[in-house]
Image (spheres, rainbow, N blue to C red):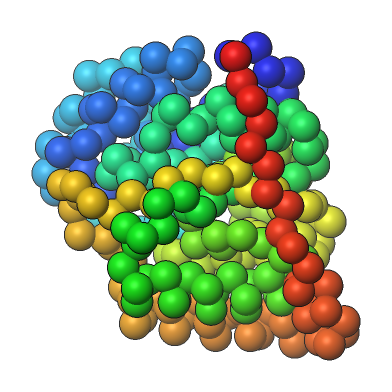
């Protein structure tokens, strides 16, 4: 991978991912990319498996939630001198093979968050999840005052300006929505999406995402941010354009 970008690493927050975590981490290491894994209080073999790999392992003695796991990872990445991070989940739904295109997009669009957007093979996505994602994209795009494709994807490139938002007061899955919104509104970052496959078939563990509780928390937070920043109608108009979707070729 010879794309010119700031010094970066991959962050993988995980919880009870013993079935997939080794193959996920090793596939990233095969690209020659440094990895930081944040184990959020697993009670299976996940931390033992990761500890045997050449990565930085951060451990929580008990579950803190995905937001705090990402926050911990951001701080460690900054401590190690990285200027950007690429996040991905540890359950196997995000593939290392998509990383080169995401990094190429980051080089093409500096000063942007890059999202691995699940726009391919969407028929695999359960209809209820697809509807929820459409609603989330509409609301979070409004709060961002710019159109964003797949606001719920956890495979993302965060530049340094986004990492500086590490102390945002948002927890669990709300943190990922919060950082998109604050980066857009306070750091003036753009958002670019790279198409990746929707992967819901296979031996994935049940999602830690609660379709009722987490959706409610994200919705309430997003509504609050829409009114917090004001210019509600103008923000809505800016959110209605077409999101930037790129699919850069890589060697």
Residue 228 drawn above or below residue 10: below
User: Quarter-wise, where is residue 188 in the image?
Assistant: bottom right
User: Quarter-wise, where is residue 26 in the image?
Assistant: top left
Q: Is residue 48 left or right of residue 121?
A: left
Q: Is residue 182 visible?
A: no
Query: In the image, what residue occupies the spot 68% across and 42% down?
Result: 246
List x then y, in percent, for residue 13: 38, 44
Q: Nearer the viewer, residue 245 or 183?
A: 245
Query: In the image, what residue occupies the spot 27% across and 60% down?
Result: 207
Query: In the image, what residue occupies the spot 49% across and 33% down?
Result: 98
- Name the quadrant of the C terminus: top right
Residue 12 drawn above or below residue 137: above
Query: In the image, what residue occupies the spot 75% across and 87% down?
Result: 227
List x then y, in percent, for residue 136: 54, 74
List x then y, in percent, for residue 25: 33, 27
Determine the residue located farthest toward the left in the rendered image: 44
Number of numbered discs present? 0
Q: Is residue 99 visible?
A: yes
List x then y, in percent, for residue 67: 46, 58
């Amino acid at each position: 991978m010879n794309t010119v970008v700031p010094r970066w690493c991959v962050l993988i927050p995980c919880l009870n991912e013993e079935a997939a975590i080794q193959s996920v981490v090793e596939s990233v290491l095969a690209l020659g990319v440094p990895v930081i894994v944040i184990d959020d209080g697993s009670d299976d073999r996940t931390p033992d498996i990761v500890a045997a790999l050449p990565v930085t392992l951060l451990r929580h003695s008990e579950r803190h939630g995905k937001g705090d796991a990402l926050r911990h990872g951001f701080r460690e990445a900054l401590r190690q001198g990285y200027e950007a991070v690429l996040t991905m989940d540890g359950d196997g739904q995000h593939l290392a093979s998509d990383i080169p295109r995401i990094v190429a997009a980051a080089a093409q669009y500096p000063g942007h968050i890059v999202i691995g957007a699940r726009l391919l093979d969407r028929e695999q996505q359960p209809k209820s999840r697809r509807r929820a994602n459409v609603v989330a994209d509409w609301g979070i795009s409004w709060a961002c005052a710019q159109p964003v494709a797949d606001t719920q994807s956890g495979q993302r490139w965060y530049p340094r300006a986004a990492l500086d938002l590490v102390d945002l007061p948002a927890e669990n899955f709300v943190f990922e929505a919060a950082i998109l919104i604050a980066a857009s509104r306070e750091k003036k970052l753009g958002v670019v999406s790279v198409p990746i496959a929707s992967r819901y078939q296979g031996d994935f563990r049940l999602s830690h995402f609660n379709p009722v509780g987490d959706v409610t928390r994200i919705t309430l937070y997003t509504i609050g941010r829409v009114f917090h920043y004001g210019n509600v109608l103008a923000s809505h108009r800016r959110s209605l354009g077409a999101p930037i979707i790129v699919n850069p070729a890589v060697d």
